Image: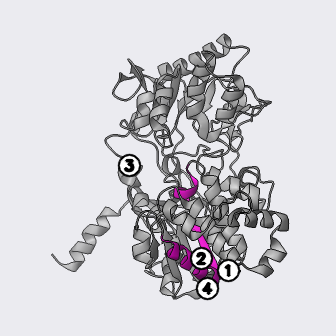
Amino acid sequence: MSRESVVEKLGERHEGVDYFYTTCHNNGCWDATCLIKCSVKDDKIVAIEPDDSVNPGVAREDDDENAVQTGMLQARACPMGHAWRQELYSENRLLYPMKRVGGKGSGKGRFERISWDEALDTIAGKMKQMAEENPDHPWLYYCYYVAFESSDFPFASYMPGTITGWGDHSTSGSAAAEDFHLGVRLTDCLIKGTSDAFPGFEAPDLLNSKLVVLWGFDPMVSWFGHVPYYMKLVQERGCKFILIDPVYNVSAETLGAQWIPIRPGTDTAFGLAVAYVLYTEDLYDHEYVAQWVEPDGFEEWRKYVVGEVDGVAHTPEWAEPITGIPAETIGAFARYYASMKPVHLQQMYGVSKRNLGDYAAAVAMLLQAMTGNLSIPGGCEGGGANLVTQPRLFAPVPDTGQIKGDVVNPITNNNNKVTEVMHCQKLYAAGEITEDEFRRRIGCPADSPLPNLKMAIIPNNYINNQHHVSKRMQGFADMEFSWGWQYFHDQPSIEFLDIVLPSPVIQFESTDMHFFGINRFWNSPSGMMNYFLFAGKGVNPPPARSVRRTGSGWSWPAASASPTSTARRCST
């Protein structure tokens, strides 16, 4: 076969193809904001290609120093981003409403297909019934993402029964430490837009770092987009890497990191021992501390570290049997760390997103303050779970015409404590715990009503993605009525729903508001904010649910008439 005939046949495959750009934001990468180019033919995505909006046709861009310094590099998706086409058209894709027949829980009951009329009428009927049966205690409805004192359920502000929570299930440990020690409230800067003090860093700032400490962090696998690219780039330019982690991970291998294996959950002890060396060997940055660190708090921290508070000196020898790290290794790390300024020390979810993880996050931030690596070129805050600033509310949001309700939903619990809410409300009703104990265990403010969950609204695969999974599954199985949206027939959370609705994949098939209504526009990756991305609809959902309510006139919006203009990198 000649070259010309091969090219001709390949060209035929592209006849009638349109393109639209969107961003892959369903994998929880947060800062990656990768741009993907989608090929559409006959209202179906036939290919997902890398970003070509800047530097098209260039395989590697680091020879353009201006592009490197400004972050104007191709935002290339990882394999998960490119795999969305298979997910969209998977045989397991849920395409119609279903109701549960029989018991709830793993391996119990079964589902039957029902009409949209039956599904929506059943849900509305249950909500009305519960409100009528509980006029004096209407806190009935729980949405999977109640955080930052808000609810992600679009109609929450219309429904007196909806509860909200404080905190966030992803960043609570680091956010608490940032609030207590850095004076930065993630809620104010991310959701409310009332603060101009943001945690995080810009990926090109890694070019200023002499040392990067990956503390419970595997960016080459778990974080995508610009950050891992810049880490590899700075490693090639001479930056050193150290990994503190129980596992020798892919990033350590790729970045040539020295590995310090640590016993899981002992990160606070390790950090205390490092601080002890910095204090007792006079290795902390006196000038930086004198200018930027509050002196009384710094002295309290010193007294605790060296043992003047409780008689326990937190020496490397003290930490060795706790952490499993030899005392000489801890001491050598502390001295090297103090000598390599600027240092980018990044602690991640594996450390802070666990029981008492806020202490480890705080220690990482305090170490960065002691060494003068906070808010300088090449440094970062240290204990933040978020790598970047995320003020997405400042990007324009399309006017949907929806009028926000005037109901103020009560804040009844910490976001991470919904499992405990379901467990404790039964104990409280049975008289086995007091009201004070109930409030303490779930983080319920004194001036808030106690929650009494009877209905859960669950989009996403929420039930199995946090701690105490077995306890959580039992709680949702005992829930009076639950419903929600799911992508696939075999998602584990589907086993705990009474009514399940098919969900559009938001960045390809919908223009619905999602995640507090701020996700249609996403800022550029890694804190640069020199452009933003609009995640617009490019195709319709699969045909089996192209009409949502037969005979009522409700239907899924048509795809954009001009797919090539629905999503593109827009300069700010």
Q: Residues within 10 Å of mark 2 (few under 14, many from 20)?
A: many
The tag earlier along the polypeptide, 1 or 4, is 4
- Residue 158 lies in quadrant: top right
Whole-angstrom CA distance, mark 2 to mark 4, is 35 Å
Query: From the viewer's perspective, is 391 left or right of 44?
Result: right
Three-letter code, disc 4: Asn
Number of the label disc, if any, that sits on residue 281: 1
The tag earlier along the polypeptide, 4 or 3, is 4
Of the two numbered discs 1 and 2 in the rendering, the one whose residue sits closer to the viewer? 1
Number of the label disc, if any, that sits on residue 87: 3
Three-letter code, disc 1: Glu
Whole-angstrom CA distance, mark 1 to mark 4, is 41 Å
Q: Are marks 3 and 2 in contact (CB under 8 Å)?
A: no
Q: Residues within 10 Å of mark 4 (few under 14, many from 20)?
A: few
Q: Position of residue 424 (x, y in %)?
A: 60, 26
Three-letter code, disc 2: Ala
- Tell me which residue sits at (37%, 29%) in the image: 106
Q: Secondary structure at mark 4?
A: helix
Q: Which residue is mark 4?
A: 66
Number of the label disc, if any, that sits on residue 334: 2
Q: Is residue 177 above or below residue 491?
A: below
Q: Which residues are magenta?
A: 326-354
**Residue nearest the viewer, comparing 530 with 207:** 207
Q: Residues within 10 Å of mark 1 (few under 14, many from 20)?
A: few
Q: Position of residue 506 (x, y in %)?
A: 52, 47
The tag earlier along the polypeptide, 3 or 2, is 3
Whole-angstrom CA distance, mark 1 to mark 3, is 56 Å
